[in-house]
Amino acid sequence: MSESVELVVIGAGPAGIEAAVAAAQAGAEVTLIDSSPRPGGQYFKQISKAFQSDDHTEHQREAQELFQKLASSNVRVLQDTLVWGIFEGAQPDTWLLTLHGSQAPARLSARAVVIAAGAYDRSIPFPGWDLPGVMTAGAVLTMIKNQRVLPGRRVLLSGTGPLQLEAAAQLVEAGAEVVGVLESASRLIWRGIPYLPALWGQWARMREGWGYLKTLAGARVPYRLGWSVIAAHGEERVNEVVFARLDPQGRPILQSRKTGKVDTVVAGYSLTPSTELFRLLDCEMIFDSGRGGFLPRRNENLETSREGIYAAGDCAGIGGAPMSRMEGRIAGCAAALRLGHGGEDQNHQGKTALRRERRFAKMLGDLFSPPAGLYTLAKEDTILCRCEQVTLGQIREAFTFGAQTITDVKNITRSGMGNCQGRTCGSIIAQIMAAETNRKPEDVRYYNIRPPVHPVPLEVIEEHGAEKAPEREG
Amino acid sequence: MRITKFTSELPAVQRGKAIEVQVNGRRAQAFEGELISTVLQAEGISVFGRKHQTGRPSGIYCGMGVCYECLVTVNGAGNIRACQTLVADKMKIETEAQVKP
């Protein structure tokens, strides 16, 4: 089953919904594809259909407004649908998407594509990080906000950025015992001074952050700057955690180390952009550590180096929901214009607002990047690739064996070849390789990726047997 | 542990209809709209799978379908993400079912 459409938008989070609606309003025929049962992405994730809630929070009002915009547009929405591949189409200037979902066609040919795939938590490996009970801040927020279930009873949070403050505040609200929040960044106030102009106008966000701090203070939860978890112990689940003060490079100062009894460790070191589809398309990538690592290069219309492929929101550089929504509108209008619909006016206005948002994103990125020394926490026998159970020791052997890029490491050790396709270990191994072999991230690069970018049943791929995927090196 | 304490910042949620599932052969209470991972957590289970290469335990990690650490067996079908799959009445869920020592 194959279909041709004008524009496909991938991902129904803040960026994707805005892109789809903007393009549809301009007159384009839009299909919005999303892997979840309901639109919203991670930021506006909705509770299950079978649940009912009397949620009058500001966040919920904002979400409902956005969903209303989508519902009253003529965007066709395909939920519960994975995009497992994207290729150059058989016709010139078309792109072929391969899908997996009960309501979806198996293939979709599009004349333009906006990728708004979002982001996920960045991990930093330490001994015991793969024990059950150690999880990301994103996981905890979903459990509490969407499922109303607690991850554990006694919790330590460690990481960087505002997301873990929100997770800590939610844990307190939900009745968990939060023993502390460790923030790896230090001297925040001193380092923040040059960024003060970027805070101008960001009142709602500052109020939100202040609210979290107030909740934590009210529950007498210690918030320590310049500290991090350094190891987790336990047999079948974490039962003890070791944490320490960090030196200015982010390496643990072992004399300061303390231990505590917990059943849950929340580790959230900011976010990693979801770049699989850009890499599969061979889009030109740039490295920007403050915005999450490797990102697709874009022009001012948010078009990547591949014509007709646009990138919007956190998948193209971490910036948060307001920035994602602005980028979505810009990319949606630009894609519609490319297809011969609409005008450019709104686009121009949007770009000015976007500059202010980007200043704020840069501040957060600069202040809350995990320091390089944290990547020294893993030991020889610490698992770096969880799917294929590859240890740091084995990864180091690959360096001595002559690996030049992390794709070489993948070919030698199988790291990144498992179910998650390198999403968890890719940025970790790149950081460690760059540091230990004295090279730049641009030189060790990112994992090459091949379809399917998500595991799908074999019969889904067999259906495509007749179609030959373009040959790629690597 | 299902959350029973609610505040203005964390408003009450009415779960779906009460249903019954099987977890490793035992009957367990569940509610429509819950994820498999939620039911396992409420049952006090934190080990969802074991790595076939090393036997190490794995459980919920990313909670958003990215890491594939929470794979369980559902009605005989393996490799189902517990954090992305809703429960259904009479569903048979098995943890640690893929051990190949």
Image: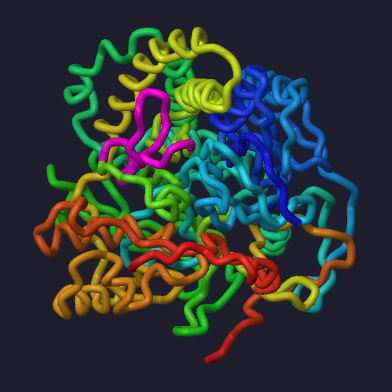
Pick the residue in front: A345 or B39. Answer: A345
Residue A428: where, in percent of width, then height? 31, 58
Pick the residue in front: A93 or A273. Answer: A93
Q: Is residue A401 visible?
A: yes
Residue A291 in magenta stretch? yes
Q: Quadrant of residue A385?
A: bottom left
Q: Is residue A210 above or below residue B79?
A: above
- Residue at (23% x, 41% y) in the render: A226
Residue A307: where, in percent of width, then height? 43, 38
The region drawn magenta spans A288-308
Q: Is residue A233 visible?
A: no
Q: Residue furthest bottom?
A: B101
Pick the residue in front: B54 or A171. Answer: B54
- Residue at (37% x, 63% y) in the render: A232
> Is residue A44 left or right of A166 when viewed as pictured?
right
Q: Is residue B25 above or below residue A436?
A: below
Q: How many marks?
A: 0
Q: Quadrant of the C terminus of chain A?
A: bottom left
Q: Quadrant of residue A32?
A: top right
- Residue at (32% x, 53% y) in the render: A229
Pick the residue in front: B51 or A88. Answer: A88
Q: Quadrant of the N terminus of chain A?
A: bottom right
The secondary structure making up most of the magenta span is loop
- Residue at (51% x, 10% y) in the render: A346
Residue A203 in magenta stretch? no
Q: Residue furthest left?
A: A438
Residue A84: where, in percent of width, then height? 58, 57
Residue A331: where, in percent of width, then height? 49, 26
Q: Is residue A326 above or below residue A453?
A: above
Q: Residue furthest front?
A: A92
> Is residue A106 left or right of A232 when viewed as pictured?
right
Snapshot colouring = rainbow
